[in-house]
Image: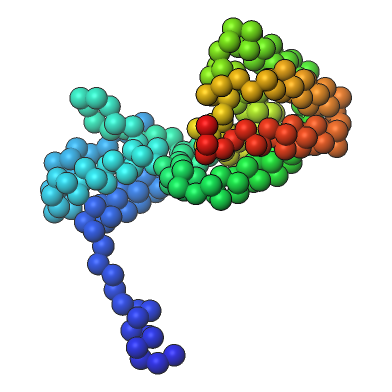
Amino acid sequence: MDLADRTQNTRIVRQKLSDQVLERLQERIASGLLAPGDQMPSEREVMEEFGVGRPAVREAMQRLSDAGLITVAQGGRARVNAIAADTAVRSMDTVARLLIAESPEYLEHLKEARIRFEIGMVETAAERAGPEDVAALRELIVAQRARLEAGDAQGFIYADIDFHRQIAEISGNPIYVALSEAMLNWLCAYHTHLLRWTGNEQTTLQEHERIVEAIGSGAPKQARAAMQAHLERSAPFFSHEG
């Protein structure tokens, strides 16, 4: 490596003031100095302590809020949120939505990732589900059928999300739950069911019933096969084109 390369690799990059404020506040949250439920310092307190202007503080606070690390109350101070799996996943939300919106290719990548993720997740559900879990899934199918009979397309999709999220809940793994909900929400904007009925809603309900039957029977392989068939059939309904 010559001198020019070494210089390029070691050059100090000047950070924006808001980035520095953000890093310091994140460190205090990560260390527990600012614990869940604590009030954040006021804008003026941060300005005085760090010697920066109001715009830098406001930008840093907004980014903490966008990441789910704090909740900004109307007319009051922000408070620190408890850090959980869904907080971590939610911090990716804006970037993920922009990426998918700008590229049909990434929508296809997401659909493939979701299938791989959910067929593994449903196997876990079939291994761990108790009678109450199976009953909860059956109740969600009833709720989804009611949305269909009411002609509520959007409600039908939300009930679909609830069904798949419940399968994630059975795992007892909060990361499964957070990732499942995130992927479903990212895909939801591209679900043509939100714009029109496709005529396949009864098929969806029948496939959900087969998935629940396999979970209730404690049959991971059958659950995997049922979920894979369901997701591969429904994947074309997620599209940039309505």
How many numbered badges does the structure rendering display? 0
Quarter of the image holding residue 181? top right
Q: Quadrant of residue 74?
A: top left
Residue 9 higher or lower than 74, as above or below: below
In the image, 3 versus 35, the foreground residue is: 3
Q: Would residue 172 be seen by someone viewing this image from the given angle? A: no
**Which residue occupies 63% across, 42% down?**
111
Residue 178: quarter of image: top right
- What colouring does the structure picture have? rainbow
User: In the rendered view, does 169 fall on the left or right side of 217?
Assistant: left
* Residue 68 horizontal side relative to residue 114, left or right: left
**Residue 39 pos. (x, y %):** 28, 33
Give x and y (percent) for residue 32: 39, 44
Q: Is residue 139 above or below residue 99?
A: above
Quadrant where the N terminus sits is bottom left
Q: Residue at x 33, y 84 (%)?
A: 7
The residue that appears at 64% across and 8% down in the rendered structure is: 149
Any part of residue 239 in sight:
yes
Indicate the position of residue 79 as horizontal and vertical percent values.
Answer: 31, 32
* 171 is higher (above) or lower (below) than 116: above
32 displayed left or right of 203: left
Q: Position of residue 237 (x, y in %)?
A: 62, 33
Q: Residue at 74% across / 41% down in the picture?
A: 120
